[in-house]
């Protein structure tokens, strides 16, 4: 796909592609900086994913372990795009076949647990936690990206085409299509991601490619038998924490991301590493639901059921959302020109009797008092003088006529 032309941004090179989008590197003119631009396909599901991802990232990108979003819009070509923080590397790419140090794995785990706990408290499920979606910022810190299939925590229904199926990192109940995602399934996915960082491969992957077909991976995930990190010494406590986070029964896992994060912090203390802060947004600052979404809807409650009102009033539904289309500066659209003509026509026909006599009125028909121009004052003065002379002549004529 060709890179889109976006005002204020200069194209540099492609960064990657997948799913419903392509990512390109651009340079922003003002302020000057490198940015990643994610261009979404114009297919219906792509547009829906665009709006959902923009909302989720805007609400959560203040967290230091979630990639920041700067702008969202529609390119001149008509394709939606997101302008985001540029992260030069991915932990998934860096650790594929090259296991990371345990100190770095635990640090990333605590940071990501804090980011996901913040998302969950805001009512958002990421639903696609995997190594390739953990990027490294320019400071070398992990940050979660790609909220393209994120959903409300209590969403009643998820389209079939958006079922999260990153198989090596998906929980058993997700690959069996029992649920589209829960807090428990996200705990599993984060644990599977940390296992991948530490082992250099996913938890259920084997050396032989023939043993790693989709069907065989799903079968092994269903059994949920977690083997220790291969070739590692002294990883017993770490293996035990991951094994609990990836138990087959969701209720037996850590109940929240905060609880999982604290378990990882205890491992840091036990290994003598520096303890990474578990950064969770305070409840008072948790992002609120977006425009048109009531707190009840965000919590999965149906309006009208609490007070017996029956069906919700359709007139209260918010208008269809849509980003503003980027335009060339100084260029007016046909819609703008038509609106200007209609406004001018309305103004000229609002009070025809007044405007035809040159009387200046406001929108409500009230005559406005405005300063008199010198030309207008001169003409009025001349008219008065002529009227005076005519009157005088009339008097003289009357007197003369009376004499005769």
Image (cartoon, helix red, strand yellow):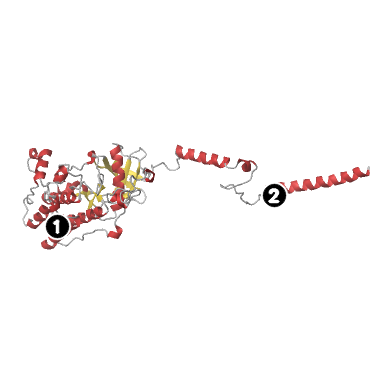
User: How many numbered marks does the figure carry?
Assistant: 2
Q: What residue appears at the point 13 percent right and 63 percent down from the top-left corner? A: 269
| In the rendered image, the vertical position of residue 281 relative to residue 150, given as above or below | below
Quarter of the rendering containing residue 288:
bottom left
Residue 46: percent from left, percent from top: 28, 39
From the image, tell me which residue sits under label 2: 377
Q: What residue appears at the point 74 percent right and 46 percent down from the top-left corner? A: 383
User: Distance between the Cα atoms at labels 1 and 2?
Assistant: 88 Å
Determine the secondary structure under disc 2.
Answer: helix
In depth, the one of 334 and 303 nearer the eye is 303
Q: What residue appears at the point 66 percent right and 49 percent down from the top-left corner? A: 373
Residue 167: percent from left, percent from top: 15, 43
Quarter of the rendering containing residue 50:
top left
Q: Residue furthest right?
A: 404
From the image, tell me which residue sits under label 1: 103
| In the rendered image, the vertical position of residue 261 relative to residue 169, given as above or below | below
Q: Residue furthest front?
A: 308
In depth, the one of 64 and 127 nearer the eye is 127
In the rendered structure, find residue 366 and report the number of the disc placed on it.
none
Left-right relation of 349 to 103: right
Work out which quarter of the rendered image holds the N terminus and state it. top left
Asked whether residue 36 is in view, the answer is no
Q: Nearer the viewer, mark 1 or mark 2?
A: 2
| In the rendered image, the vertical position of residue 285 relative to residue 397, given as above or below | below
Q: Closer to the N terminus: mark 1 or mark 2? A: 1
Dot 2, crowdedness within 10 Å: few (<14), some or many (≥20)?
few
Left-right relation of 78 to 213: right
In depth, the one of 92 and 174 nearer the eye is 174
Q: What residue appears at the point 84 percent right and 44 percent down from the top-left corner? A: 394
Left-right relation of 136 to 222: right
């Amino acid at each position: 796909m060709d890179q889109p032309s976006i005002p204020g941004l200069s194209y540099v090179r492609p960064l990657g592609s997948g799913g419903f989008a392509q990512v390109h590197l651009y340079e922003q003119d003002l302020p000057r900086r490198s940015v990643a631009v994610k261009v979404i396909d114009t297919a219906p599901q792509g547009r829906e994913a665009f709006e959902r991802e923009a909302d989720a990232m805007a609400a959560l990108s203040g967290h230091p372990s979630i990639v920041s979003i700067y702008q969202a819009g529609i390119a001149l070509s008509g394709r939606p795009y997101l302008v985001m923080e540029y992260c030069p590397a991915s932990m998934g790419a860096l650790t594929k076949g090259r296991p990371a140090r345990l100190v770095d794995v635990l640090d990333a785990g605590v940071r990501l647990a804090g980011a996901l706990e913040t998302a969950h408290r805001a009512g958002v499920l990421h639903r696609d936690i995997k190594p390739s979606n953990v990027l490294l910022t320019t400071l070398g810190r992990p940050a979660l990206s790609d909220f393209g299939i994120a959903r409300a925590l209590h969403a009643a229904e998820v389209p079939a085409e958006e079922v999260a199926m990153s198989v090596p990192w998906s929980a058993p109940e997700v690959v069996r299509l029992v649920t589209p995602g829960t807090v428990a399934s996200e705990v599993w996915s984060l644990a599977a991601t940390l296992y991948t960082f530490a082992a250099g491969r996913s938890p259920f992957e084997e050396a032989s490619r023939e043993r790693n077909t989709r069907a065989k991976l799903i079968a092994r995930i269903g059994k949920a038998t977690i083997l220790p990190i291969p070739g590692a010494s002294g990883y017993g406590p770490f293996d035990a924490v991951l094994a609990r986070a990836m138990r087959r029964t969701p209720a037996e896992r850590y109940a929240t991301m905060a609880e999982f994060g604290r378990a990882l912090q205890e491992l840091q203390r036990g290994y003598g590493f520096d303890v990474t802060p578990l950064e969770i947004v305070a409840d008072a600052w948790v992002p609120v639901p977006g425009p048109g979404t009531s707190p009840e809807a965000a919590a999965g409650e149906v309006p009208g059921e609490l007070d017996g009102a029956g069906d919700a009033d359709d007139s209260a539904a918010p208008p269809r959302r849509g980003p503003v289309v980027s335009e060339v500066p100084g260029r007016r659209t046909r819609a703008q020109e038509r609106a200007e003509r209609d406004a001018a026509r309305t103004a000229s026909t609002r009070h025809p009797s007044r405007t035809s006599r040159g009387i200046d009125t406001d929108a409500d028909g009230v005559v406005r008092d405005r300063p008199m121009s010198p030309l207008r004052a001169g003409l009025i003065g001349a008219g008065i003088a002529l009227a005076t002379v005519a009157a005088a002549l009339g008097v003289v004529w009357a007197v003369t006529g009376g004499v005769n």
